[in-house]
Image (cartoon, rainbow, N blue to C red):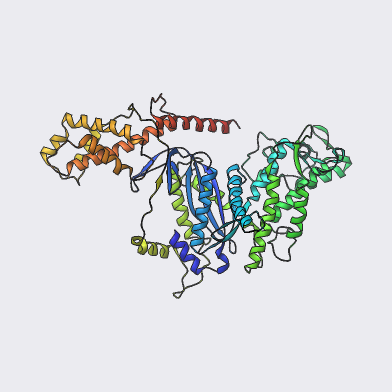
Amino acid sequence: MFKYLKLVATEIDPKDLHVVLIWDEMSLQPALHYDRSKDKMVGIEDWGMRRTRKFADHAIMFYIRCLASGNHMPIGYGFCNSATRTAQLIRCIKQWLTVIIKCGFKPVATVCDQGGQNIAAINMLIKETNNLRYKQHNNPKNTFIIGNHEIVPLYDYVHLQKGVRNNLLTKDLVNNKYKKESERQFASWNDIVIAYKMDIYSFLKQRQMPKLNDRHIFPNLIPKMKVKYATQVISHTVANFINIVLTWNKGIVNTVKGEMCLPASAAITADIILFFDKLFDSFNKKENKELSCIISPVSKHISFWQNAVNRIRQMDFVENTTHKHIRHNAKCLTNWIWTIKGAQYVWNILQKCGFSSFNLRYLNQDLVENCFSQIRDHGHRNNNPTSYQFCASFKTLVTTNLTSKHSISSNCKENDEGTSLSLSKMISTAASCENDEKEEETECTDSSIPSATNCYIFVDTDKIIKNIITNKTVMQCAECVQWLKNEDILRTIEHAFQVAELKFVNFFYETEIKKKLKSILYLEVFTRISTHCSTLLDYLIEETAQEFIVQWCKFINKILNGTQQENYENNYIYNEAKRMSMRFTKKKNLKQTK
């Protein structure tokens, strides 16, 4: 991957070296899978260079996108227990930005949603850089520096728009909070509800807001994660309909449900809806809209954004009944200001680098969201894939991306042979350099846990013996076959399983787990056993270790999916799996009730 990026950086248009780093998270089905080829467990918290024994139920993916062409590529992922912790997220951001820089790219910005851990990580990175600026007697900025590159952190404007809608569902939005209480103006979701009912129950033959349905309007029906249910309500269509109703017959409309009336204050609701629609369009390029064109030196984005920042500063969410100030107010308004200013700063940087225009749609998380949708749809529809399924889908997506017209190398300059950098070239280059690379060690850190005392896994000794006997690679003789069927050997295998179950919990999250397990089994169980054929003992230990790991994973997965429920006395990992199962089931039931 990294050799490919280095090769790309030497051959693409220099403007496309300016990239944005994007990341997002998706939920996973907790489950363990033993990766035999890599001799490690998949399904635990894993950051590539750091692993823990916690079960993973989320994946975080990192993407890069070229700011000139829009070409893109997923570059990595990690598995985490619940949302990524702030400290770990900071490490990931620094790591990936450093990798990008070493490959020859020039990161300009980052894009993420306004989740608590993202905000905390961004603030910490900015604080670290500002501390250095203070020491150098420079003014603080809302940017941070990695490898002498100034990075502008942005929040996904799509999530910001959803945040405005979500807060408006339960609160009112004051339009001029610094005015006297008697002069303040408020936008209310109730005005939108009334306008919607007028539209569906009016005597007109055609609806004026045909895209809207109950799932757009009523809070208990709204799919909170779907973008269209926010943008189709916060739109010029809804604002225009409210203004027409208020102008026509003073807001009174006769319907099949009787007379309905929009209050005069709904004009403020329409005005704020129209404002946020224009603000969203200024980032989300669409045709035939004044503020939706690509930003350029002659476009009206800068003047509109300056006025937008001043207007948002006058806004605040308040209680919808009393209009009292809310102590912990919504962060979407503050983050809108942050992102507007950040986008201006990015545009200034790009202009200095020779950009004459810039597509602002490159500054959102749509790429990662679409990638998650493809992972869920890979093979069959699976809203909650396991970590192993995620890995398999990710490999497929990377391969597809490298061969698509939107690949990061699709606009590479032609080399002497007249061909652009391709997947086949990447593979051949990686193969030629494979022997020169040393495998980096993985840090496996976690606190100590109590020793396990009880065993729960069933041992099918006959299966292990059968696998050895039927294995054509095992050199056998009649004496060895008879020896394998001895009752003492069967009891030894059972004892080996017991030893493995008690010891395995201490290192199952590390790498080379089968190698370590085989060493333990040899020293504690099989060291006193002698065989007729010298290689037979090695195969016996190999098969016992392999079968145990497979059965152990199955047992853990039964606990995780709730089909195996017991009181696992003095077994920390089994009890952790049980707690994870209860948490996941509770979350699943909560989603179904919504």
Query: Where on the picture, by quarter, is residue 387?
Result: top left
Q: Position of residue 411 (x, y in %)?
A: 53, 67
- Residue 589 point in image, percent of width and height: 55, 30
**Is 190 on the left or on the right of 527, as rendered?**
right
Q: Is residue 431 left or right of residue 90?
A: left
| In the foreground, 543 or 195 | 543
Determine which quarter of the picture holds residue 257.
top right
- Image side of residue 340 versus residue 54, left or right: right
The extreme right residue here reads 249
Query: Of 489 and 475, which appears nearest the observer?
Result: 489
Residue most toward the bottom?
416
Q: Residue 237, position in %: x, y?
A: 76, 48
> Which residue lies at the image location 65% right of the left edge and 53% below the top edge?
142
Residue 543 percent coordinates (x, y): 25, 40
Number of disc labels:
0
* Residue under the point 45% across and 49% down: 393
| Residue 365 shows in the view | no
Q: Nearer the viewer, residue 201 or 444?
A: 444
Look at the image and tell me in which quarter the N terminus lies.
bottom left
Instruction: Please tell me whether residue 401 is drawn above or below residue 215 in the rendered image.
Output: below
Image quarter hosting the C terminus: top right
Residue toward you, 28 or 440:
440
Q: Is residue 547 visible?
A: yes
Instruction: Tell me if residue 441 comes above or below residue 265 in the rendering.
Output: below
Is residue 407 left or right of 134 when viewed as pictured?
A: left
